[in-house]
Image (spheres, helix red, strand yellow):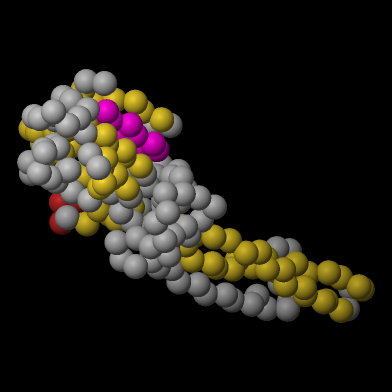
Amino acid sequence: MGPLCIFTTAANANTIAGTDRTTSIVHTTIASPTVGANQAIYVGEPSLYAPTVNITNTIVANYATGIQQAGGTVTTWNTLFDGNTADTSGTVTNNAPLAGDPDFVAPANDDYHLGPASPGVDAGVDAGVATDFDGDARPQGVRYDIGYDEVLQQCGLSTGVNYLFASPASQFPSVTWAASIAQQRSTSLAATRMPRASQGTG
């Protein structure tokens, strides 16, 4: 995969969405299943117009160079880097960068959804994006996820059965429920009541 190239010219401000020579890359995943030979993002300046590129809540993984600044101004916020030979080249202002395995579901099959162990979960900032690539609402957790995917959070219940004894001849079970949040795309839940004759906590 070749790099995402961002230039400015007199006729066209930039090659992707932006205004006046300013380009914003938001909630984007740029990744390769193996280390690519190119840059993930290349910012150049082949004209009199110097581009300004703002990168927010983006994953850059498995490239020779993650972000190369050959011209203009490049600023990032909450970018997750992993597996790059060099995360940046040139002058790149990194605000709150992260490093670690994004825990992609199946990168060999081009599935770059985040797994529950990803450091990108709840690590982003509010960039004004209300849904992810799949149309799922953002945020699902206490903060926004980094990348194009927002990990769905399912609410489940776990039980503990405590038995209280009023006398040797009578037993009164009380069932306590505790809510838990599982960061995953699907979950199943089963609950079983223990026999009244059992003692202790199950």
Magenta residues span 73-81
In front here: 105 or 188?
105
- 76 is within the stretch colored magenta: yes
Q: Is residue 125 left or right of residue 49?
A: right
113 part of magenta stretch: no
Quadrant position of residue 100: top left
With respect to residue 120, does 152 lie above or below? Answer: below
Residues 194 and 90: in front is 90
Quadrant assignment, res 80: top left
From this view, report whether residue 15 is shown above or below residue 176.
above
Left or right: where 35 falls relative to 159: left
Q: Residue at x 43, y 68 (%)?
A: 187
Q: Residue at x 88, y 78 (%)?
A: 169
Residue 164: horizontal and vertical position, in percent? 83, 69
176 sits left or right of 66 in the view: right
Q: Find residue 117 and report its horizontal and vertical position in percent.
A: 40, 47
Q: Tell me if I can see residue 44 in this picture.
A: yes
On-image quarter of the C terminus: bottom right
Q: Quadrant of the N terminus?
A: top left
Q: Is residue 63 visible?
A: no
